Amino acid sequence: MSSKTSKQGASKKAAPRQNQVRQSPAAQNSRQAVAGRTAQATAERSTPLTREQRQAQARAVAAQRRRAANLKKIGIFAALAVVLLGTWLALYLQEANKPGQLVAQQASRPHVQPGQSHPDYITDPPTSGPHVGQVPDFKVYSEPITKELQVHGLEDGGVAINYRPDLDKTTVDRLAALATSYIEKGDPNPPSNLNARHPNRLLMAPYDFKDKSDVIVLTAWRRIERFPTYDEAGIRRFIDEYIGIDSHAASDNGDRIPGLDGP
């Protein structure tokens, strides 16, 4: 084979390689643009920042930190709000599920003398307020006792079953049997132990209601519930919830009766 022919063959073989590395103008422009941006970024990093640029960067960093701190505070406040709301809701539901109506506490100090005038009670029968220094016996009464004596019984953890004086004997007997089942319970704690719960502090007595439609009304310290008929389950639920809970701390720390002096 002649040298001329060999050279032509070599030229033909080299031609494809040249075509493979040859690029379009668009690709070349893209590569040049990337190279230009890289070169510019490198130049910017190597070029010292001016004072204004450094200050701007510092302000940007500070603003970013403030945003992060504010987001953290918002998260903490949101978590606290959820906890407080949950606690309030739990307490609300717990209170709502208790038997009887919750009543505001009346001023209960100082003790009044038997027959002494004082502000009217806000409920009938009373659930707190002025009361005498004597403590009632926890038992079944066949005659009414004074409101002032009954209130002192409530303060000492008592529950009172009040019933209309003309209530039929069958219902009165059923009430008395129920009351006796509590009164006869043993109490292992001395009466002066205010921190103990006394399970037998219940009294029952006829009561002349202001509202003549009342039939059976149970009271405890700051609690009242009315029963139009004998409802043993409801009555026991009220008694079991509140009996024996001493309320001297709440009473002693409450408002004093206006115009009255004494212990």
Image (cartoon, rainbow, N blue to C red):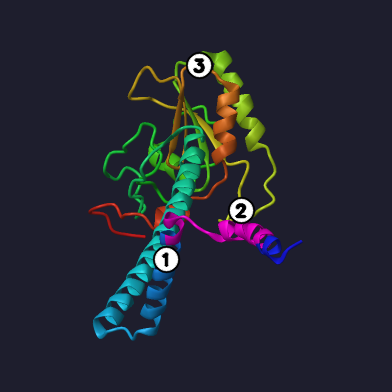
Q: Which residue is tagged 2? A: 196
Rounded to the nearest angstrom, the CA distance separating label 3 from label 2 is 33 Å
Q: Point out residue 117 in the picture as x, y percentages from the top left corner.
A: 26, 44
Q: Which one is in front, 246 or 175? A: 246
Q: Nearer the viewer, mark 1 or mark 2?
A: 1
The crowding category of the residue bearing disc 2, from other C-alpha atoms within 10 Å (few below 14, some 14 to 19, many at least 20), is some
What separation in Å lies between label 1 and label 2 (alpha carbons)?
Answer: 90 Å
Sequence order check: which comes first, mark 3 or mark 1? 1
Residue 138, quarter of picture = top right
Q: Which residues are magenta?
A: 8-28
Q: Quadrant of residue 182?
A: top right
Residue at point 36% right, 68% down? 64
Q: Secondary structure at mark 3?
A: loop
Amino acid carrying label 3: it is Thr
Q: Is residue 183 left or right of residue 167?
A: right
Instruction: Write the residue at 60% across / 58% down.
Output: 15
Horizontal and vertical percent position of residue 62: 34, 74
The residue identified by callout 1 is: 32
Residue 258 coordinates in the image, percent (x, y):
24, 52
The amino acid type, in three-letter code, at marker 2 is Ala
* Residue found farthest to the front: 2
* Foreground of the two, 28 or 44: 28
How far apart, in angstroms, are the residues tagged by discs 3 and 1?
A: 97 Å
Determine the main secondary structure of the stretch shown in magenta: helix
- In the drawing, does residue 234 fall left or right of residue 63? right
Measured as percent of width and height from the top left, residue 147 is found at 39, 37
